[in-house]
Image (cartoon, rainbow, N blue to C red):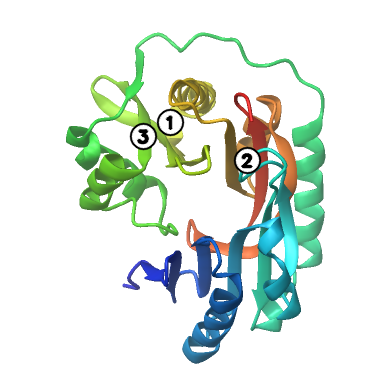
Amino acid sequence: MIRPDETVRLGASWIQHGIYNNRVYLMKLAAGEAGDVAAKLDRLAARRGYGKIFAKIPAASAGPFLQRGYAREAVVPGFYGKGRDGWFLAKYFDPDRSQLSRADRSQIKKILALARAPASPDASPLPEGYVLSPARAEDADDLARLYRDVFPTYPFPIRDPAYLVRAMATHADYVLVRRRRRVVAAASAERDDDYGHAELTDFATRPRHRGRGLATHLLRLMEERARRRGLRLGYTIARALSPGVNRLFASAGYRFAGTLLNNTNIAGRIESMNVWYKLLGRA
């Protein structure tokens, strides 16, 4: 069994890397480190033989990365504050990883068109017998069991209860839906309190409970809680070949920011991901 990628400091910045996703992921760039970090990421990827570097950075810090051959795959306006856009960059060390098959490219295009089609927001109530609530540390075992059952692989170790407990204590707000005391759906908001945004992620619903709008209720609760915390922007990195999750965010008022090619090991293979974003409050 391949171990999940490790999250470590690189100077004062934070990265994730490993063979699980076969990439280096610059999660948070510290001020003043762009040039040094760009060089170190290249060396790390070359030394370990990773296929891709994925970097989330302020647009103003992009120079050293662009000079080293990084390309922009998505842009989120105001990601780092008013007038401070976020750029999602990529550099490929494996040429095949930068390519999409004709079938995948066509399918992603169709899914985006479907997601953007006009639709009324889903205002239906939570189905009878389902209970929506924030998750607590004592729910970690049930949450991990849900994620193990739904995802054969995942880019972060959310199938480990200990990881979930640590995440809840530091930076993540999980929400869940129960039916007859069993967790049947869940999601999380991973906060960056420094910059006032949250990644809305880790959506999972057990197969027999799909089609009931549970993800919509999870998303609404996460948005409400994010606003109460004073966060001003929500975004997601969603599976590009999943019609449901792209439609979920588009219908909730999120804007498309770009596609990250062959980016993430999820549900058993490396998949491309779409970035969506929405202003939740004042910038």
- Let me know if residue 173 appears in the view: yes
Q: Residue at x 33, y 25 (%)?
A: 134
Q: Looking at the rendering, in which quadrant would you find the N terminus?
A: bottom left
Q: Position of residue 9 (x, y in %)?
A: 38, 68
Residue type of the residue flagged with mark 1: Arg
Above or below residue 185? Residue 52 is: below
Residue at the spot 63% in from the left edge and 25% down from the top edge: 282
Q: Quadrant of residue 91?
A: bottom right
Mark 3 falls on what kind of element?
A: strand
> Mark 2 to mark 3: distance in Å?
24 Å
On the image, numbered disc 3 is attached to which residue?
174
- Where does the image place residue 128, in percent across and percent down from the top left? 40, 8
Give the spatial CA distance, label 2 vs label 1.
41 Å
Looking at the rendered structure, the kind of residue marked 2 is: Gly
Write down the residue under mark 2.
Answer: 81
Q: Nearer the viewer, residue 124 or 57?
A: 57
